[in-house]
Amino acid sequence: MRSNWATALSDGGPRTLRRSTATIRNYLDAALPALINWSTRYQHLREVTRQDIKDATANLTGLKRKRALVGLRSIFQFHKGTGHLFQDPTTHINTGSIVPNLPTLLRPEQLEALVDHATTPLRRLLLALTAIHAARPTALRGLLLDDTGLPDRRITIGGHPRRLDNLTARIITQYLIHRHRRWPHTINPHLIVNEHTAQNEKPVSPHWLGDQFRETGVTLNQIRMDRQLEEALTHGPDALHLAAVFGISERAAMRYADAARAFLESPLEQ
């Protein structure tokens, strides 16, 4: 029955969207502890009660609780729809809302590790674009040579033009010299290339990009978030300012403004 459920999710249906293998695995992983527990007491899923669902999620909070309930609800709804169950015990049990964690600043030792690790033109470029311009990994992969705008000191990141500071301009220039020496005949229009993409016109892969600072234990997204929070702390928790500087959504800007406000109002900061 479990395989039928997974197949139904994978194939989709008239009223349901297809689910990826990763999503199906997440559903099952979240629901599995409860299913294993019930298998020691019950012979069939129809014996599971609403109280069993509540008991199985009683010690879970936040995202873990939400994932467990979504996984269990998917399983019970499938079996009810196929006639194996008469009722769904997960009905009307609220999964709750998830309050996202507010961004936090990187610790001094993390910043030092990043600087020490930026020993190549590529890593210095990634660090500058992320730590100064708060570029997302997706934007880094999509950045084109024509987006750099060295002559007029403008750079376009993720479709958002901004002023190109002297430090970043110098780092880009050094990287371009390195890029030309390493791959003088590449026709790839992307700024960032590697030994594989230099042979075609594709962007670098997300995994390869994430590997560049993996040894430091800090992700590119953490660096980006640190930069945006630093801006909010320096210029005040102004969401409109953050949206204008980084080209982020109003919702994201408000999140960073809230984080800066919480930081500035904390007893330690006072």
Image (cartoon, rainbow, N blue to C red):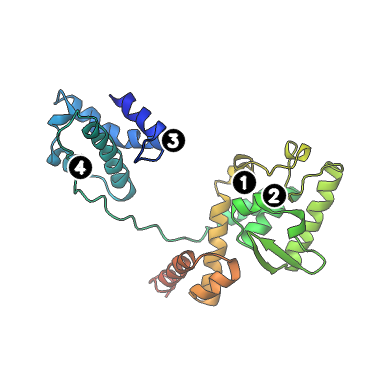
Report the amino acid beneath label 4: Thr
In primary-sequence order, the first of circles 4 and 2 is: 4
The reply to whether residue 119 is in sight is no
- Residue position for label 1: 213
**Image quadrant where one finds the C terminus:** bottom left
Relative to 62, is 222 on the left or the right? Answer: right
- Residue position for label 2: 123
Q: CB atoms at circles 3 and 2 under 8 Å apart?
A: no
Task: State how far apart marks 3 and 2 are (Cα).
Answer: 31 Å
- The residue located at (20%, 42%) in the rendering is 90
The reply to whether residue 157 is in sight is yes
- Residue position for label 3: 22
In primary-sequence order, the first of circles 3 and 2 is: 3
Q: Residues within 10 Å of mark 4 (few under 14, many from 20)?
A: many
**161 and 64: which is toward the camera:** 161
**11 and 230: which is toward the camera:** 11
Task: State how far apart marks 2 and 1 are (Cα).
Answer: 8 Å
Task: State how far apart marks 4 and 2 are (Cα).
Answer: 49 Å
Task: State how far apart marks 1 and 3 are (Cα).
Answer: 25 Å
In primary-sequence order, the first of circles 1 and 3 is: 3
Q: Residues within 10 Å of mark 3 (few under 14, many from 20)?
A: few
Report the amino acid beneath label 2: Arg
- The residue located at (16%, 25%) in the rendering is 44
Q: Which mark is residue 136?
A: none
- Where residue 102 appears, x then y in whole percent? 42, 61
